[in-house]
Image (cartoon, rainbow, N blue to C red):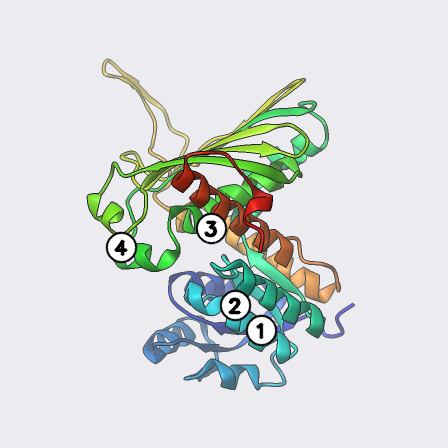
């Protein structure tokens, strides 16, 4: 059991997602004491610190890691820096929360996870959808046997607009950036491992995405170890907003979770039946989930328990993404064992 009842935290990276975590830690989670923040762009860190009441701003993450009074770090920097920062934080004896993915390369992931294991610190990966109340209830109902043996899982994930082209060029592509959340959700909902991936990708939204070497529309079929099948569909553009739906069909029934809307009003008139569009994007849709995942991370430290989303959980979807990329390239199903280093 943690002696003080509060966890002293440093935040590395205070852009969009870093700001969300900083606000949640400072305003909604009394178990947290945010000591310092840093960012590759100092002005960004200064703004975050001022708005959230964080005392210390460091120009270099190494200065933050040197602080003996900081016992945990929240890594929200760019993807290519995650693996190295996990290694450095582990070597400094800090518990770690890191946004997905750990790295784009599996060997880099294994190096980071080995550093965590050697240091004996905790590592939680930022798959916030696991903490969405509706998705978690679907998981709980499936695991309780309410719908019997799972047969088919369907996941729909569509963004309102594509991200900037520069982001796409550095993200690893749709499978490592967007579908990675759905790969994690598939494992979470069925509590089973995927053995085979069959993916198709195309460019229908924006030709410049294709010229950058990526897809903007994809469908992925998964085959699980215990026989269940899954279908994931992704698109970088949805005219009606952020579309997030899941459904699990089993031997005794079906459970699903739909989109969240700003309010539940329904208007009926001569033109039809109308209700509000889904919440616009992930920051609004998963607002509560972001708070809950950080609360879970703090609890793992305070109670000395394994984090709910481990390094192994962070690695598995990257393996699936690499299998999906190979599947599209070779136009065939790919077993995950084929892409393991």
Q: What's the distance in space between the residues labelled 2 and 3, CA to CA? A: 26 Å
Q: Is residue 77 above or below residue 185?
A: below
Question: At 29% across and 47% down in the image, what residue appears?
Answer: 162
Q: Position of residue 160 (x, y in %)?
A: 31, 41
Q: Position of residue 217 (x, y in %)?
A: 33, 37
Question: At 37% across and 51% down in the image, what residue appears?
Answer: 173
- Image quadrant holding the N terminus, namely bottom right
Compared across the picture, whether 6 is left or right of 245 comes to: right
Q: Tell me the element at label 4.
A: loop
| Circle 4 crowding by C-alpha within 10 Å: few under 14, some 14–19, many from 20 | few
The label shown at residue 87 is: 1
Viewer-proximal residue among 306 and 171: 171
Q: Is residue 153 above or below residue 191?
A: above
Q: What's the distance in space between the residues labelled 3 and 1, CA to CA? A: 29 Å
Q: Which residue is mark 3?
A: 287
Q: Which residue is mark 4?
A: 164
Q: Is residue 335 visible?
A: yes
Q: Is residue 132 visible?
A: no
The label shown at residue 83 is: 2
């Amino acid at each position: 059991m943690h002696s003080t009842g509060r966890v002293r935290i440093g935040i590395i990276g205070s852009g969009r997602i870093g700001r969300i975590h900083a606000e949640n830690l400072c305003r909604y989670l009394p178990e947290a004491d945010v000591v310092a923040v840093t960012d590759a762009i100092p002005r960004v860190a200064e703004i975050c610190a001022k708005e959230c009441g964080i005392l210390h701003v460091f120009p270099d993450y190494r200065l933050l890691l040197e602080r003996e009074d900081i016992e945990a770090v929240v890594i929200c920097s760019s993807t290519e820096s995650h693996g190295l920062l996990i290694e450095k934080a582990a070597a400094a004896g800090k518990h770690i929360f890191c946004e997905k993915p750990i790295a784009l390369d599996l060997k880099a992931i294994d190096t980071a996870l080995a550093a965590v294991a050697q240091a004996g610190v905790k590592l939680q990966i930022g798959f916030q959808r696991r903490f969405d109340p509706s998705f978690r209830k679907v998981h709980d109902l499936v695991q309780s046997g309410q719908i019997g043996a799972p047969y088919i899982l369907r996941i729909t994930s569509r963004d309102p607009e594509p991200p900037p082209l520069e982001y796409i060029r550095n993200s690893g592509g749709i499978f490592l950036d967007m579908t990675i959340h759905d790969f994690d959700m598939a494992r979470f909902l069925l509590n089973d491992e995927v053995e085979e991936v069959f993916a198709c990708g195309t460019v229908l939204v924006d030709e410049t995405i294709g010229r950058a070497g990526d897809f903007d529309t994809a469908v992925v079929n998964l085959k699980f170890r215990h026989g269940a099948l899954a279908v994931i569909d992704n698109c970088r553009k949805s005219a009606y907003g952020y579309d997030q739906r899941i459904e699990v069909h089993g031997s005794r029934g079906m459970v699903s979770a739909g989109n969240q809307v700003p309010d539940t009003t329904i208007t009926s008139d001569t033109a039809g039946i109308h209700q509000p569009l889904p919440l616009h994007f992930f920051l609004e849709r998963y607002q509560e989930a972001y708070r809950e995942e950080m609360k879970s991370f703090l609890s793992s430290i305070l109670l000395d328990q394994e984090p709910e989303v481990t390094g192994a959980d962070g690695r598995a979807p990257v393996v699936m993404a690499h299998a999906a990329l190979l599947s599209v390239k070779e136009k065939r199903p790919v077993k995950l064992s084929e892409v393991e280093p």
